[in-house]
Image (cartoon, coloured by chain):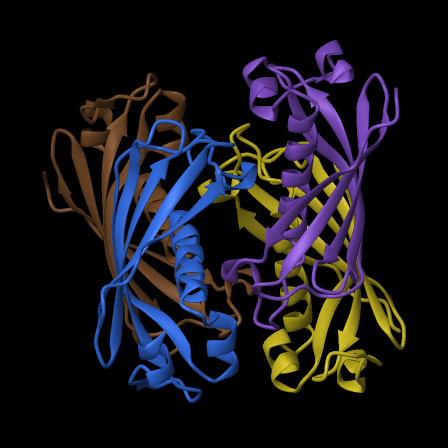
Chain colours: A brown, B purple, C yellow, D blue
Amino acid sequence: MEPQPDCDIEIRVRYAEVDQMGYLHHSRYWIYFEMGRTELLRRSGMTYRQCEAAGIRLVVVKAEIRYLAPAQYDDVVVLTTRLKKMSQVKMVHAYELRRKSDDVVLARAETTLGCVGVEGGVIPIPDSLHRA
Amino acid sequence: MEPQPDCDIEIRVRYAEVDQMGYLHHSRYWIYFEMGRTELLRRSGMTYRQCEAAGIRLVVVKAEIRYLAPAQYDDVVVLTTRLKKMSQVKMVHAYELRRKSDDVVLARAETTLGCVGVEGGVIPIPDSLHRA
Amino acid sequence: MEPQPDCDIEIRVRYAEVDQMGYLHHSRYWIYFEMGRTELLRRSGMTYRQCEAAGIRLVVVKAEIRYLAPAQYDDVVVLTTRLKKMSQVKMVHAYELRRKSDDVVLARAETTLGCVGVEGGVIPIPDSLHRA
Amino acid sequence: MEPQPDCDIEIRVRYAEVDQMGYLHHSRYWIYFEMGRTELLRRSGMTYRQCEAAGIRLVVVKAEIRYLAPAQYDDVVVLTTRLKKMSQVKMVHAYELRRKSDDVVLARAETTLGCVGVEGGVIPIPDSLHRA
């Protein structure tokens, strides 16, 4: 695998994503990371929508995260997504989320994805994805 | 259509459903109402899961709501769901959400559902649903 | 009240917002409309974050919607938000959501907001908001 | 710390929680785990609502999960929550989520919580929580 460029996206924290402490709820970070993977793939010339249409479905099999500082409603955050490893059967992505205004790191995370065929079983990651 | 019994369910408000005002976010009520429809249908001897497996998909085409008082984290609320009208092509449900501790009405709402076939177009509501 | 300009924002439908029919779940539209209100207010020179910091909290007291066509994962949708009416005690917003690729109208909706003071009771809408 | 009993709760997977693969979205598991912590604490004679009212706010600082099998709409799942470790400054919970119908394990996870004071800084976990 050749070195992959990082993918940065900006997200504005929505009111409905914040809890009564005034913090972005810890479960929503995973939705942001999924957006990061979507955009990383798009920049490689493919879309995840095309993947699913072709019967390729990627599921998260493992994930871990460290929350370092809270994000608040209306904050603009910058998410950096990087494809860290890719084998025949899994993809590992790394994420860093920073607050845009002061570049403070809010969270660092990693997910492992596996590929699932139309019948639900684990399958090797298709060549089309490897090339992308 | 014979008169239908109401269906009451209890829901405890989750931390992740509450916004920074400390109130159940107004968008989550619709998720509760969908749970109410699911349980109303189950009590009639059918499940919505079976409906979808049979190619029957119900979509919300119209909705309206009045929010009367807020619900808070950890409140237990009681949702009453009632099938108000059913025609060849649509179903109208009415909802009332009350706080369990003092029976205060929190919201009243109504939704209109239409039936969508496997190709996406509107179809008449199948007999199996009418019977249920 | 002088005529207010409309506010258009673009939103890309997230994977986590779509249900198993492949449609943007009907509850998520309200989250988009809240984003529309946030941006409409920002363009008037104020932010809702400042409002809350000043003890002004706006709550939805009434809402209605017509769903006309579904949005799907990765669709870009355009939301037009307009302040339709503003009285001493309430604000009415109108929304139109269109698919960007073909300009098809997906939904039309309206919300009524009231103002709540720090103790929870309904209060008149402050002058600062009227001016904005 | 004396050995703590496990806390089991049942949750029915909601329609709005499932993605277009028909699976409980991976971000929603954390909402279930939060419900598990809420109930575990309640059984110890305290509520998290009381904690927050007393100025004690618990935030997730670290989390990890393995997804082993998918849950689907309308599945009833059983969540076992256990307090694994508790120190002066953090609490570690372990979670196991199983499908009720066949007892298949769907996920195993762990979270680390820290305590945050009213000004936002990390504080030792109060005695009241240790006793509970």
Horizontal and vertical percent position of residue A70 = 38, 73
Judging depth in this view, the residue of C119 and C103 nearest the camera is: C119
Residue A120 visible in the snapshot:
yes
- Residue occupying image coordinates x 23% and y 69%: D2
The residue positioned farthest toward the top in the image shown: B127
Picture quarter with the C terminus of chain D: bottom left
The answer to which image quadrant residue B71 occupies is bottom right
Tell me residue C51's x, y (percent): 66, 80
Note whether residue B124 is visible: no
Q: Is residue C10 left or right of residue B6?
A: left
Q: Quadrant of residue D85?
A: bottom left
In this rendering, the answer to whether B26 lies above or below B3 is: below
**Residue A69 coordinates in the image, percent (x, y):** 33, 74
Residue at x 12%, y 29% (from the top left corner): A88
Taking A61 as reference, is B23 above or below it? below
Residue found at x 50% / y 36%: C73
Pick the residue in front: B108 or C12: B108
> Going by the picture, which residue comes out furthest to the bottom?
D119
State left or right for residue D17 relative to residue A7.
right
Viewer-proximal residue, D129 or D25? D129
